[in-house]
Amino acid sequence: MLAAADTIEVIARQVAKHRVPVLVVDPVMVSTSGAQLLPHEAIRGLSQHLLPLTTVLTPNIPEARLILAEGRKSASAPPEIGSVADVEAMGRQIQALGPSWVLVKGGHLPFRADMTVARTEAQRQVVVDVLVGPGEYVLRVESPWQESTSTHGTGCSLAAAISSGLARGRDVPGSVRAACRYVEAGIRTAPNLGGGHGPLGHFHSTYNLPFSPGYFVEYLLDRPDVRDVWKTFVHHPFVMALGDGTLPLESFKGYIIQDYLYLIHFARANALASYKAKNMDDISRSNKIVQHIMHELKLHINYCKSFGIAVAEMRATEEKQACTAYTRYVLDVGQSDDWLALQMAIAPCLLGYGAVAKMLHAHPQTRRDEGNTYWPWIQNYVADDFVQAVKLGSQLLEDNMRLQSPTRIEELVKIFIHATKMEIGFWEMFPYQQAAS
């Protein structure tokens, strides 16, 4: 802890003298109990001498308030925080004092699901750590709120984890995200020593897997070899045309017929997964997904009727090559590989449609009225039943991927990537732009 102005000045001079290229600073100013640990002279020295040399600054919200109050040279308190956007604004103001990146830690201020400040204990649902960086860069790392006394040393552990990531060559956002996940999992897996504020469970990831427990899907979608393919799938022009209502109607009608044919094979794949499972929990989960597909097919049939498409017509329609290639690839993985490989082959469909609908539902260019023929389609995939199916499928992966070796994980990721490319091919079966007249 940099407890005195003189100490801070000495460190700042040495950092400048030796041209330290990367500096992570945890401004330990406020204790867990809320007590201020640094005198104002030390805070002033930190702001004047050390912040301009800092790569990543990691204040919690009370510390951020003290830094801003000193930066303003005013006794007036910074504005009250009402939302995550206010935390971001606070980070930007601190960044103006010199640090390249500012991570405002949100553990002292839990939010509700709508990202407004929780006013009661019952409303505490989400913790949001906000990273602001050069230009307009913003990263929000959301974690479920945890009621825990195992929080001693969280700030130190977080700063050390960020430093470790940077030392290994990761960029700042990647290091920060991984560090936040490391600390969150450390609180969740803490040994609960003693009767007061005890330590984290620092050794939860010593099994050498590249993700923290409960965050495989996040790790998967953020991998460099997955990220661009996933973005192409979720933000494909066909998808964006669904959102703004410009997709040619005949293309959509052709798509929903092929989607009906796909869903039949998707149900077969999940039934195969149930057969290949080795325990009742996994058998039950796969059966629940099949039941959900049955429900989805009924909705699909009714939806197709609104476009003048009868069930008989869909059943009589020949599968497009993209549909055949995708569904048989999934079934081939299921036949030739194990249960988990099959789960990875079908995961892009379940996770992807959830991601597509969530993105379109929030996108500013999406038309949300009767003028968009496809708005009901979007609403179907943000409905509670589908959201729950996505959660079920995600949890199934989380429960099993942490039991795999690093080599096996790489094999499974390749299956996921190939299946995602097949999903992209599904979007490209039909034109997504109006033909020029």
Image: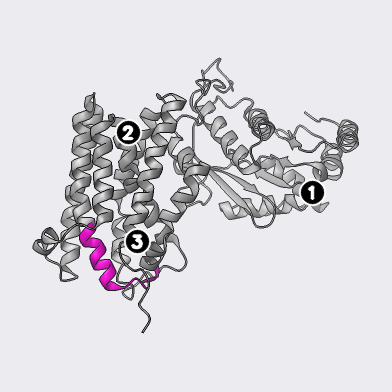
N-terminal label among 2 and 1: 1
The answer to whether 17 is drawn above or below residue 241 in the figure is above
Q: Does the magenta stretch include residue 8?
A: no
Tell me the distance, in whole angstroms, between the alpha carbons under discs 1 and 3: 47 Å
Sequence-earlier tag: 1 or 3: 1
**Residue indicated by mark 3:** 428
Give residue 197's quadrant in the image: top right
Taking the image as shown, residue 40 lies to the left or right of residue 377, namely right
Q: Mark 2 points at which residue?
A: 341
In this view of the protein, which residue sits in the foreground, 280 or 45?
Answer: 280
- Rounded to the nearest whole Å, what is the CA distance between mark 3 and mark 2? 25 Å
Q: Which residue is drawn at 38% across and 41% down?
A: 416
Residue 393, position as x, y percentages in the image: 32, 39
Neighbourhood count class around disc 1 (C-alpha, 10 Å): few under 14, some 14–19, many 20 upward: some
Identify the residue under disc 1. Answer: 98
Q: What residue type is labelled 1?
A: Gly
Q: Where is residue 226 in the image (x, y as percent from the top left)?
A: 47, 44
Quadrant for the C terminus in the image: bottom left
Residue 385 showing in the rendered view: no
